[in-house]
Image (cartoon, rainbow, N blue to C red):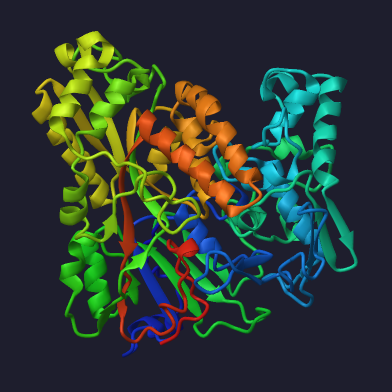
Amino acid sequence: MKFKFFFSVSLSVMWAVFVFASISHPNTVVYEQERAAETLDPAMVIDTASFEVLSNIYENLIQLKGTSLTEYTPVLSTNVPSVKDKTILDNGRTYIFHIRQGVHFQNGDLLTPQDVVYSLERDVVVGMAGGDSHELTEPLLPKINGSYVSNISQWSVKLAGVKSWSELFATDTKLPRNDRCKKALIDTFNLLAKDFQIKGNDVVIHLPHPYSPFFSSIIDSVAMIIDKKWAVAHGAWPGTVNTWWLYHNPTRQKDPLYSITNGTGPFKLYKWIRGREVIMKRFNKYWAGPAKIEYAIIKTVPEFTTRKLDLIRGNADIISVPPQFIGQVRNINGIKISKNIPELAEYQISFAFSVSPHSKYIYSGKLDGNGIPPDFFSNLNVRKGFEYLFPHQVYIKEVWNGLGIEPNSPVSKGLIGYDPSIPIYHQDLAKAAEYFKKAYGGRVWEKGFKFAIIYNSTDPTMRQACEILKTYAKRVNPKFNIIPVPTLWASLVDSFLGNEIPMIALDWFGTSSYNRVYGYLSSHSVYGLALGHNFRALARKDFDPLINAAVAATNTNEAQKIYKEISMKVYNQAVMIWLIQPSRQLVYKDWLKGLYPANYNPFRDKDLIFYNLSK
C-alpha cells in the first residue's frame, strides 16, 4: 500500500529547512504512493502498506539474503539454523537460534530471548481472522486429523468438544462457559508453549512436525520481534496461559498496539497521520549502525499528477507511477527510471462463490435481470463465461505498457512450482456466449444479470480492468450489466472480509509458492473467508489436501508436482481471472543513492527499505 506526505504546522523550523533546502531535504527521503497503512501492529497486518512501514521499524530473526529467494542471512539471530552446524535437528523439527546480544529496542530496552518467544507466541494467540497468523500457527501447533491448523481457536474447539469458538464462552462475553471450556483453552496454549525453550541466549523451537516453509514463515510481518515488557505495559497480552483468549482476534482499532511501535529496526515512528503520512526518524542506537538519513517519510498521494509534480520539484525523492503514465516521466532532467523489476505480485478478478444475501452489490438478489442470486458464481459455466470475456494481452499491452506477463495460476513466475505449460484462458467471445447460454439452464442468457465489481479507487489499472470486463459482457449480451464501483481501501477490506462483494479486482503479494496457494485457495485464508461458504466447500475438497501435501513435500521435485496439480485444478475450476504478474519500475530523483539493485529483493517488491538510502 501507499502513502501521502503533508507538512503540518507542528513540525519544527529545522524540519522546514530540511524540506526547502537546495537539495530538497538532504537528510530525508520522501516516498509518495497511493495507499495508506491500516495498522502498526505486526500481528494484525494484511496489507502491503502497513508491512512497508513496519519493515523499517521492526526486524525478524532472519531475512532473505540480497536479491535471493532461497538464501537467508542472520538479523536478530546471529545464525541461520542449518543441519551442517547442528542447529537444525530431529529431521527438521528442532531449530536453534542464537539471539543477538546488545540489541536495543527503540525505547532503550535490550532484546532478550524472552522477547522472541513472546513475539512468536503472541502472533499465534492474536490469530486475526483472515490474517497471516497461519504462517506461524501451522508449524507451531499439532495437526488435527492430519490437517495443518491455521488458527489457534481450532484446537480449543476440538479439545472442548464444541462446534465453534463462540460456544466456549458465556453469551456476549469472553468468560469460559464452564470448567471444561476453560481447561480446553489452557490446554490449547500449552500445546503452543511447549514448542519453545530458552537455553542461555538461545531460543530453541521444537516443531510438532517437519514444516518445509518454516524459514518463509519467520521472515514475514507475523514474526517481527517486539518488546514484551513494553507491549504488556501498553495493554497487550501479558503472556499468561489463563488470559490468552481475551486477546484473540481483536478488531483493528481496538488492538492496543494499533498505532504505536517499538522495534529494533533502523527507524522509529515519529508521527502517523492515518491516511496521509508516516514519518519515521533514525534510531541512532541501531545495532548495525545508524541509517545514512535522519527521516524516512511515506506519503499517501492518490493523484499521479501531484506525485509527478512533487518529484520534478524535489518535494518527493521516489514515487509510484501507474504503468500507463511511465511515458510522462521519461526523459525528464534529474529523474531516473529503473529497468523492469519482476514482482511476486499478481492482479486478479475474484468470484465470490457465495455472498451475503444482504449484500447491496447483488441488487435484487435474484436472477431476474436486475441482480444476481447470492450463489451466482458457484456455477462453473458462469465462471468460464467470464474467463473467456477478458482480453488479457490487450490489457497488458495497453493498460500496463507491456510491463508484465499473464499469470496462469496462483504460483508466480520465479517461484517453486511455476509451470509455463499450465493453460491460460484467452478472450473468445463465442465461447463466452456458449458457457453463459449453458448457465442455470439458459436463464442467465435469457434474463441477464446485474451486479457490482469492486476495486480500489486509487488504482487506475484495476478501474480499467473492470471497465473492460463490463464492456465485453455488454457486447456478448446487452442484458449483461456489470457496475464498476470504486471504493476506498479501508472500506474495501472490511466489505471483502465481510463476504459482501460478489466480484472484486485485487492484487495479492505472496512470499512463496505455499503462501500464494494458501492465500488464494485455502478454506482458512483471507480469500477463503471472503469468497463464501461455497468456495470453502470447494477448497476443503480440492485444495486443502494438496496445500497440506505441498508443505509436507520432502524435496523440490515432489513439491513442484503438487503445485502443478493445484494450478491445473485452478484452471479447470475457473477460480479467478488472472490479469497480470507485473514488472515494477522505480521512478526517483537522480540524487538518491542505494536504491536499486542493492536495495531490492522480490520478496519485498512492495517495500521501500530506507536503511541504505542516501543523497
Looking at the rendered structure, the number of numbered marks drawn on it comes to 0
Question: In which quadrant of the rendered view does residue 483 lie?
Answer: top left
Q: Give the answer, above or below, for where 313 lies relative to 301.
A: below
Give the percent coordinates (x, y) of residue 239: 80, 48
Residue ID at (78%, 78%): 102
Above or below, 242 relative to 159: below
Q: Residue furthest bottom?
A: 22
Pinpoint residue 450: horizontal percent, then vertical percent.
Answer: 21, 22
- If the image is split into quadrants, where does the N terminus sit? bottom left
- The answer to whether 46 appears left or right of 184 in the picture is left
Residue 447 at least partly seen: yes
Nearer to me, 568 or 352: 568
Relative to the observer, which residue lies in front, 105 or 394? 394
Residue at horizontal 16 percent and vertical 24 percent from the top: 433
Q: Is residue 575 visible?
A: no
Q: Position of residue 159 (x, y in %)?
A: 80, 25
Q: Is residue 462 left or right of residue 218?
A: left
Q: Quadrant of the C terminus?
A: bottom left
Q: Position of residue 143 (x, y in %)?
A: 73, 35
